[in-house]
Image (cartoon, rainbow, N blue to C red):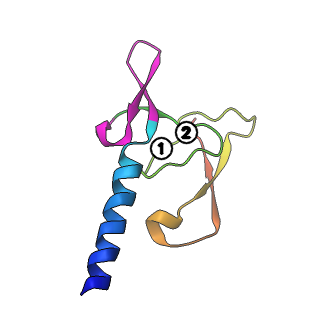
Amino acid sequence: MVKEGTEDWRRKQQDIEMNNRKVQVHCGDGTFEHTEWKNLRVGDLVKVEKDEFSRRIFFCFHQSYEDSICYVETMNLDGETNLKLKQALE
């Protein structure tokens, strides 16, 4: 019972740390402002930079490389460790 309680406490601490991470969200006037993950709402447009961690599911609207592709690790969502190829919407 103590082990489970300790594991629950650690998970809660990790959740708090993740929810307090900063992310850039679109303001509607062409600018982005920093906010915390816990403040995101469905429909928010978020700017994700190269190698930046994300704990949400996103649609890729724009990619800065010519072929408009990116590789996404989804281990936190589905447990798979391989990178998945995604292409930006046209």
Q: Residue at x 49, y 49 (%)?
A: 54
Of the two numbered discs 1 and 2 in the rendering, the one whose residue sits closer to the viewer: 1
Mark 2 closeness class: few <14, some 14–19, many ≥20 residues within 10 Å: few
Q: Which mark is residue 59?
A: 1
Name the spot of residue 47 as percent of width and height, x first. Answer: 51, 32
Residue for badge 2: 89
Q: Is residue 24 located in the magenta-colored stretch of the structure?
A: yes
Mark 1 closeness class: few <14, some 14–19, many ≥20 residues within 10 Å: few
Classify residue 12 as left or right of residue 24.
Answer: left
In the picture as drawn, the residue positioned furthest to the front comes out as 2
Classify residue 73 as left or right of residue 65.
Answer: left
Secondary element at tag 1 = loop
Question: What's the amino acid at mark 2?
Answer: Leu
Q: Residue at x 36, y 47 (%)?
A: 19
Quarter of the picture containing the N terminus is: bottom left
Tell me, yes or no, whether the two marked residues, 1 and 2, touch with CB atoms within 8 Å.
yes
In the picture as drawn, the residue positioned furthest to the bottom comes out as 1
Whether 74 is drawn above or below 25: the answer is below
Q: Is residue 30 located in the magenta-colored stretch of the structure?
A: yes
Name the spot of residue 85 as percent of width and height, x first. Answer: 65, 56
- Range covered by the magenta-colored residues: 23-43
Secondary element at tag 2 = loop
